Amino acid sequence: MASSIPSGAPGSREKKYDRQLRLWGANGQNKLETAHIALFNASATGCEILKNLILPCIGQFTVIDDKLVEEADLGVNFFLDEDSLGKPRAERAAALLGELNPDVMGNYIIDNFSNLLSTKPELFEPLTTPFTHFVLVSPFPTPLLLLLPPEIPTFLVYSLGFTTSLRVSAPIHTIVETHPDSLTDLRLLNPWSELSSMATERTTNLEIQQKVDGDGGMSDHEHGHVPYLILLLKYLEDWKQSHGGNYPATYKEKGEFKVLIQDNMRTNVPGGSEENYEEAIAAVLKNVREAEVSSETKEVLNDTKCANLTLETDNFWIIARAVKDFLENPEQGNGLLPLSGGIPDMKAESNGYVDLQNVYKYKARYDASLVEKNVRTILSSLNRDPSSIPLDEIELFCRHSNFLRRILYRPLPAEFSTLPDEHHKKAVCAALSSWDADTSLIHDYIALRAYQSFVTETDGRAPGDTDETLEVDTAEMTRLAELYLKEVGWSTGLGERGKNMIREVVRTGGGELHNIASLAGGIVAQEVIKIITQQYVPVNNTIVFDGISSRTGTYEL
Amino acid sequence: MVGAGGIGCELLKNLVLTGFGEIHIVDLDTIDLSNLNRQFLFGMQHIKKSKAMVAKETAGKFNPHVKLEAHHANIKDLNFNVKWFKTFDVVFNALDNLDARRHVNRMCLAADVPLIESGTTGFNGQVQVIKQRTTECYECTHKPVPKSFPVCTIRSTPSQPIHCIVWAKSYLFVEIFGTSEESSPDMDTSEDDENASEIANLKREAEELKNIREKMASPDFAATIFNKVFCADITRLRSMEDMWKSRKPPKALDHATIVKDAEGVGACVVKTDQKVWGLEENYVVFADSLRRLATRMVELKARATNGEAPPILTFDKDDEDALDFVAASANLRSLVFGIDVKSKFDIKQMAGNIIPAIATTNAITAGLCVLQAFKVLREDYKSARMVFLSRSADRAFSAEKLSPPNPGCEICGVARTSIEADITRATLGDLVEKVLRGALGYGEEVCVLVGQALLFDADFDDNLETPLCDLGFGEETFVTVKDEGEEEEEGTRINLVIAVTNTIFTEDEAAMTIPEPFQVPRKLKASEVVEVNGLANGVKRGHDEVMGGMNGHVSKRRKVDIVVGSGEGAAMKKEKVFKGKGPTEEDVILLDDDGCITID
Ligand SMILES: [Zn+2]
């Protein structure tokens, strides 16, 4: 192609990240590009996690590690090469990882967590730290874990042979773009006046067979193209007339309602049935229901953050409050959330479909404009610039208003203190006594807890790292696991599977397998991205992966 | 490893560091900028180079003990025949399209080589283990086919943006820059009574476009095209009063008015690909991209030598000029029909069937592929799993036991064998007598087909003396054999597919190899089907057995060898992968039957 021809190419950055922009959009990408990830421990797993964050373009990363590259690293870590032997791991990993993406800035610190805590405490202070997220690949002694600042989202990772786990902890995490399968909210039982009148208008001659042009009847073509939403609205109205003003509510009534629709279908047409009627019947069970506020959205709207707004409150909570006001105001939502506005595809003529689409769209826009008004009022009352939250952001929030999420991550000390809290005890005991306890991955977790205690008392030495101590280490690991179980109030002790898991963890001698490190790198980075972009629902709070059975389990511990 | 894209890069890294002995990489593609957000074996300096070659080069550095071979080629090429597939212990599919997946599935069934099939879409992914007669094959279950729209919807009654996009991409673009003979999978042009006249209309309008095409070099080319497709054609459509009785009629666009209104809109609007353009902006992009494409076409024509087929352009989502043209044309048509217009970013996804892709999902999927490969190499299909990844917060993925083959599957519900034959010397008689009746025990009543063509049955023996090459056999030919014997007590045989690979033998050798005799399974009565494979039928989500014993010997040395690799950089070695090479004097690590790594 001649170079003189101007090309319409969008920036090469957009093109490079095109495939992921389709998952999290410019919103998510911007957040990703301002993140600065600190990785403690440039192990194979640590490097694989960073790889999966550097490729989609986080802003910066810093590798923190005080070891030198050994032969042992080369066979398992793709991001350390022959030339790296004997050099600082932090430096080499940062250099090789950095090559993956020139858009990302890489840094390293040749030091360890414990030293830095005393020599550079500012790195761990929320107000002074350059880091936005911490990724820690064990081992770290427990007292250090308890010193981590709760304000900074932290990902604590274990990767030992075939066993891996991730623990996420973060300050209150809110999500607007949860990406549910569908945002559609049809309001069939709560139609507003424009929708009702459209349904009436479009169905006046529905039952009259057209004989000749212009006789006021409906032709077969027209009849077969009345959008199914209109049909549902019309027959729901009919049903109400004959059922004392009530809509079909029970499963049985909905079945009868389907028959009612079926009976009104024209069958003397080509094919013997009408697609739009079939669509209407198929939609009954799923869509004929009261518009309800989801329990997740209720959690958000009832959070104290919604009630106690201050000058510093996040936009999320301000808009949430505006939506709550909308919901509770009889002049506005009157018990309903702002409408999302989308409708599914259906058999219809183009104009019939577009008109219907517009009725939903205008209502959604109107609802959002009321929420916007509430937002502006709230901002003024907080002495903030009323226009400081753009309409786009409010509309996005309104579209997702029934799918909001707020996650309260449990802080690490609640789990790792010598005396874990009641929630933790209950969660572990529940998993140990559940019907699938025999195969539950909670045993993997318990073995990793024993490992955590072991490295704490040995100052970082992994159990099973030498032949000589193998027996002793296994015994000590078993003792630590039993001790932990006692702490959580599980009196039955370590079962057969628990003992197997202890042996499995000791067998690895603290070593990683490349393939598992790579897999763990994918699982961990995925959760990091969800937290950074504030999109999709991240795990709360622990995910365990077992490479032998290719299984994962999640627990809130 | 078929495919060196997103999953392929991860997979190759894992295989190399896990210490597999010999890995062949097949990929037809070259590297594109949009690959770099996940295909980490490639960098900016590799753009437009072969994926297979670059992947080999980059990954090879990490373990010089692995033999890597790259094929920058289409897996459907004839040299990748059944015999070639048979040389592998396991095949990994890391492909992005249905057609190639199906092909490899069939080749692996024919070669009786286990296949690990994988794919991802955004956060979702899937890993499936396929082994002939043991598990479901790729085609045992129905796969959704890409959606196709009736021609009338595209031609006259669009109601959704996608209809206008298909029109712009598969009709307008093709008529102006491509060859209209090519049929598009997006459009269903099968004729019936109802749409015959519309198809005739479409053909007539296409003919008119072809005439305008001749004026590509003229300065008012854009105006001419615009006037035809957004004004004249629409006006004609509008005049068919019957059509618009119950529909809102389309509104033709007036070129002169739009040109005037669009004054001052710069062509740089095209850069704002996530913004929804208005009428004037769409017009500007339409005219500008059409000019760019026409210039290219004129240059191509000037360069073309006599006798060559006239140059054409084909739509490619990554060709910005083509994408701009399709986006703007689709939107202008949407405006004509009162349909929502879309941003160029969205249109690209719809027109290009773009599948979102990220590094994390690929890493997880590739890791799972290798874990399944360990089980496959131990022939432990009972603990191999079919794994589904989703973005659900409850679990990263779920694993299911493998399903047994679908007895009704047309692809794997047949017996298979393969032979080599010199097709210029071997006759159909050799095949029937020596292979079917001799080695496999077929009787008189047997029927032999290639595709739909009948070559032989009990009443048709004309071809027995004919060499295979004269019966349409090529480098590799799949022959279907049907047992038409009387219902015997053991039942008739299921269909047999023989892969015949053309091979040159010396004159003194037989012209055809004879397969190891085996019993072609008999058809089962429906009631027997369940027990066929030893894998419980219909049990989908069984208990995973408790993790196998964890009694591997533990030693410092072992840990160093497995986890870390020896000084020479050799990582874990696997006996089965190193087939024929024999273990070396060094410690050889085996994956033993309980899923643990132990050491000899
Ligand atoms: Zn099959």
Image (spheres, grey):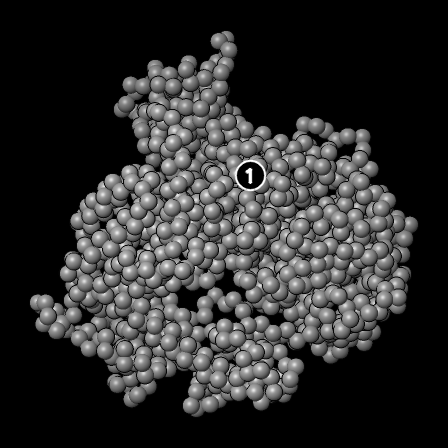
Would you say A310 lies left or right of B208 here?
Answer: right
Q: Is residue B109 above or below residue B124?
A: above
Residue at 27%, 77% (x, y): give it: A199
Residue B432 pos. (x, y %): 39, 22
Residue B522 pos. (x, y %): 42, 37
Would you say A514 lies left or right of B500 here?
Answer: right
Q: Amino acid at mark 1?
A: Lys
Respond yes or no on whether mark 1 lies under 8 Å from ligand 1: no
Q: Quadrant of the C terminus of chain A?
A: bottom right
Label 1: few (<14), some (14–19) or many (≥20) C-alpha neighbours in 10 Å: few
Choose between B221 and A34: the one closer to the eye. B221
Residue at 67%, 69% (x, y): give it: A541
Q: Which residue is mark 1?
A: B48
The furthest residue to the top: B508
Choose between B573 and A486: the one closer to the eye. B573
Residue at 84%, 55% (x, y): give it: A110
Query: To which chain does the residue with label 1 belong?
Result: B
Q: Is residue B257 above or below residue B222?
A: below
Residue A328 pos. (x, y %): 48, 89
Choose between A310 and B150: the one closer to the eye. A310
Q: Is residue A347 visible?
A: no
The count of marks equals 1
Would you say B591 lies left or right of B350 here?
Answer: right
Residue at 15%, 61% (x, y): give it: B241
- Secondary structure found at label 1: loop
* Quarter occupied by residue A475: bottom right
Q: Is residue B321 above or below residue A113?
A: above
